Amino acid sequence: MSDAGTTVIAVASGKGGTGKTTVAAHLAIAGARGRPTMLVDLDVEAPDASGYFKGAGRSGDASEVSVLVPRLVEARCTGCGLCAKACRFGAILAIGGVITIDPKVCKGCGACVNACPAAALEEIPMTVGQTSSFDADGLAILEGRMAIGDIRSTVVIEAAKKRAAESGAALQIRDCPPGVSCPATHAIEGADYVVLVAEPTEFSIHDLGAAVRLARGRGVPAGVVINKEGFGDADIAGFCEREGIPVIGRIAFKRERAASGAAAEPWSDDAAISGEIDAILALAADGARTDGGLR
């Protein structure tokens, strides 16, 4: 279990379009029926989980997320270029003794400041995004959102995770970024269980393999939900058997469900799906408690 007895279930996918956010939203709805639950949208480049809750209202103020970036004090600079050599991200250029800093590329590590022998760099805060909280009939929603044009998604993800941890919710459902790059890695870090959502296509099997390796590499137990079952004929279940990862749910493809998902409408009138979502949540929570699933 995570700190303070909170169960954190991350919902992830190897590729976009599998229905990851739809599954995350419905798991949060199911969880909120029995315990204090928070849906945490960590897909900070394009957060849209709150779209499933049209009546959600803001709860509390938005919290700005910032990083400390260097600013050159020209009067002190000797043009030695040590700051540029220390920067691993190409945010600082030293040409002919002239120092140029691109704060939008800076990751805020502070290496350049420590490397400067003339104390010619000072750190100032730069806004990279924000976190916002909402309430949807008792379900808490926390959204991380990057500032337009920024690239520091992981900073916003970590800020959202920290704010979620302070909420005291008994259950957190994280809607993670698709794929297996740095944002997805940060999003599943610290989770108790990962629900990997896949669809029965060859593309999805390929990308599911990468997601499985990510979960295995982070040491987080995981299970697979086969969404849109019947839409394609790729053998997701066979892949899972070969990889030693459990299939914890199957959601059959129906055009009505696809239409609802496209419109960000919950499956509230779909009686057949309620039991399946409850079963997926129960298996994920049990896997979190018993360290079950993929390792």
Image: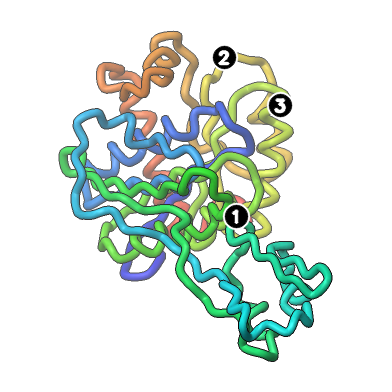
Q: Please report contact status of discs 3 and 1: CB closer than 8 Å, yes or no.
A: no
Instruction: State the colouring used for the structure image.
Output: rainbow
- Image quadrant where one finds the C terminus: bottom right
Instruction: Please give the label number shown on residue 43.
Output: none
The quadrant holding residue 1 is bottom left
Marks 1, 2: nearer the viewer: 1
User: What is the three-letter code of the residue carrying label 1?
Assistant: Thr
The residue mark sitting in front, 3 or 1, is: 1
Q: Does the CB distance between marks 2 and 3 fall below 8 Å?
A: no
Q: Which residue is mark 1?
A: 185
Q: Earlier in the sequence, mark 2 or mark 3?
A: 3
Q: Residue furthest right?
A: 96
- Provide residue 284's location: percent of width, then percent of height: 44, 47
Near mark 1 (Cα within 10 A), the count class, few <14, some 14-19 or many ≥20, is some
Q: Which residue is mark 3?
A: 203
Q: Earlier in the sequence, mark 3 or mark 1?
A: 1
